[in-house]
């Protein structure tokens, strides 16, 4: 076991050195720059899997230990290769200052053309081996997290950091109180397992409302255990149970293969305490899958009073999960004044607001009460303060007229994407579609990946360092409300964020165009 731990530690040091060295050579490499950039991206992907692999290998699984050993071999070769590239760059600087015969120079190993070809082939082969290793990671149960993501799903202690701060939420106080009432005070809820459902259209704020409920003082006093699971399209019962257990134990539990063992461990950790389980963004209409999960939940629920809070776009899902009509909270669209308040909040400090207010109120009316649209459009208006820009957005009849259609919200959101000021910023946004939905995106990792893709290029004297450009682009996407759920450190700096599902769909769509 000690030898395994040392292997993991040394491997992280070596891989870190390789990533750093590859990054240093990105702007110096000539003739194999694209191969090196691809390799740098793959290295970043591998780093995100390493923590998960290192954690699982201590259980003694030979296949995971073998995976680490293969990664060690590739890392050693890559380390040697980076040294070779660095040495050749330095040697070439010295050689350029001397008079060398062209014929002898051509046939030596240090011929630039031969060297570039050799490096391109070596990097391409190493990258292929690393890609294959990453692909095999999924089959071993390893997760591609792309960052040192905290494995703890959301419990009470994690509410602030992972649920994000739904600050500036407008027009939902009454909805919060109704859900709190249903969860705590409704006398008809005295069942072993009661399901409360929040139903509403895309972008109306179902997840935000559920976050506000979880942060409510009465809820946190009543439910000593709060578990938040982002379900999305994949209603995998085993995954849901494992994430519940992780939120209770504050440790990764993917290596537990038996569902019965997971259920028993959850039961032991819950004891006799009431819990609130939030299943966010549920799409599943397969009654058998829900019944499977429901039976597991009944097996861990020893007291009356625990609740399941579901967010979903369809009434069919709520009904299938056994939500009685009285326990369905249909989340309606906001009033036009509330949408204008959201937009106006983004425009704080704009000296031209009075002149633009009437136009802004008309745009707010076109948002049809969808807060996500109001927030994103507000971000666009904040960054485009000319009257003509506002009028152009307001008068885009084709886009606003499509809002009732299936992909209407996405078409409206694309108004904001189309108005991003730089092509590189659009590329950076589209690149974010590589992350899974509901993924916690670490700021520093994202900027490194942008750098590896070559999106960050100096455009004036103000931003000398590439990292400064990455910081600016990250802040720009936050400003345009294309990132949300900002996680801040003790100094108030944003260290991570997420993308709304609909924003992720937009990023995926434009990345294919």
Image (cartoon, rainbow, N blue to C red):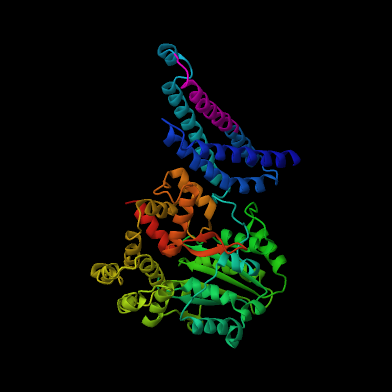
Q: Nearer the viewer, residue 169 or 223?
A: 169
Q: Which residues are magenta?
A: 76-100
Q: Residue at x 60, y 88 (%)?
A: 187
Q: Position of residue 376 (x, y in %)?
A: 39, 67
Q: Is residue 365 visible?
A: no
Residue 119 in the image: state x and y as whole percent: 47, 27
Residue 503 falls in image quadrant:
bottom left
Front residue of this view, candidates 140 and 458: 458
- Name the residue furthest bottom: 187
Foreground pick, 229 / 156: 156
Whether residue 334 is situated above or below residue 399 in the rendered picture: below
Q: In the image, 361: left or right of 98?
A: left
**Is 357 situated left or right of 61 in this image?**
left
Q: From the viewer's perspective, is 429 left or right of 291?
A: left
Q: Residue at x 60, y 68 (%)?
A: 160
Magenta-drawn stretch contains 90: yes
Magenta stretch: helix, strand or loop mostly = helix
Residue pictured at 67% horizontal, 64% vertical? 248
């Amino acid at each position: 076991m000690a030898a395994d731990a040392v292997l993991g530690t040394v491997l992280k040091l070596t891989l870190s050195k390789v990533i750093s060295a590859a990054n240093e050579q990105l702007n110096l490499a000539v003739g194999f720059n694209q191969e090196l950039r691809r390799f740098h991206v793959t290295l970043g992907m591998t780093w995100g899997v390493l923590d998960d692999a290192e954690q699982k290998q201590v259980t003694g699984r030979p296949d995971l230990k073998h995976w680490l050993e293969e990664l060690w071999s590739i890392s050693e070769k890559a380390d040697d290769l980076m040294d070779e590239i660095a040495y050749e760059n330095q040697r070439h600087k010295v050689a350029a200052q001397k008079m060398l015969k062209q014929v002898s120079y051509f046939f030596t190993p240090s011929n630039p053309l031969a060297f570039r070809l050799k490096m391109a082939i070596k990097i391409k082969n190493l990258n292929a081996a690393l890609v294959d290793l990453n692909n095999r990671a999924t089959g071993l149960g390893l997760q591609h997290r792309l960052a040192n993501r905290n494995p703890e799903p959301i419990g009470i202690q994690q509410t602030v950091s992972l649920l994000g701060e739904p600050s500036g939420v407008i027009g939902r106080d009454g909805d919060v109180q109704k859900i709190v009432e249903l969860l705590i005070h409704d006398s008809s809820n005295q069942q072993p397992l009661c399901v409360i459902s929040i139903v509403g259209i895309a972008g109306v704020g179902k997840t935000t409302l559920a976050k506000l409920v979880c942060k409510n003082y009465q809820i946190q006093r009543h439910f000593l255990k709060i578990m938040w699971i982002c379900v999305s399209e994949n209603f995998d019962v085993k995954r849901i149970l494992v994430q519940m257990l992780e939120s209770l134990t504050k440790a990764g539990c993917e290596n537990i293969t038996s569902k019965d063992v997971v259920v028993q461990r959850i039961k032991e950790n819950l004891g006799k305490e009431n819990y609130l389980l939030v299943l966010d963004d549920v799409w599943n209409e397969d009654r058998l899958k829900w019944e499977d999960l429901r039976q597991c939940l009944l097996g861990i629920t020893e007291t009356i009073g625990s609740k399941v809070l579901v967010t979903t776009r369809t009434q069919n899902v709520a009904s299938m999960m056994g939500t009685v009509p009285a326990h369905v909270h249909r989340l309606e669209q906001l009033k036009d004044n509330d949408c204008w308040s959201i937009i106006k909040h983004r425009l704080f400090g704009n000296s031209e607001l009075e002149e633009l207010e009437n136009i802004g109120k008309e745009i707010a009316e076109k948002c049809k009460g969808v807060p996500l649209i109001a927030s994103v459009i507000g971000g666009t208006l904040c960054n485009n303060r000319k009257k003509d820009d506002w009028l152009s957005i307001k008068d885009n009849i084709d886009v606003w007229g499509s809002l009732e259609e299936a992909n209407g919200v996405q078409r409206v959101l694309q108004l904001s994407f189309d108005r991003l000021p730089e092509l590189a910023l659009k590329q950076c946004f589209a690149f974010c579609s590589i992350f899974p939905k509901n993924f916690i995106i670490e700021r520093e990792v994202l900027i490194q990946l942008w750098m590896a893709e070559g999106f960050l290029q100096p455009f004036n004297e103000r931003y000398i360092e590439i990292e400064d450009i990455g910081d600016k682009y990250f802040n720009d996407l936050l400003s345009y409300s294309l990132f949300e759920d900002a996680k801040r450190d003790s100094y108030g700096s944003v260290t991570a964020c997420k993308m709304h599902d609909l924003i992720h769909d937009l990023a995926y769509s434009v990345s294919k165009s």
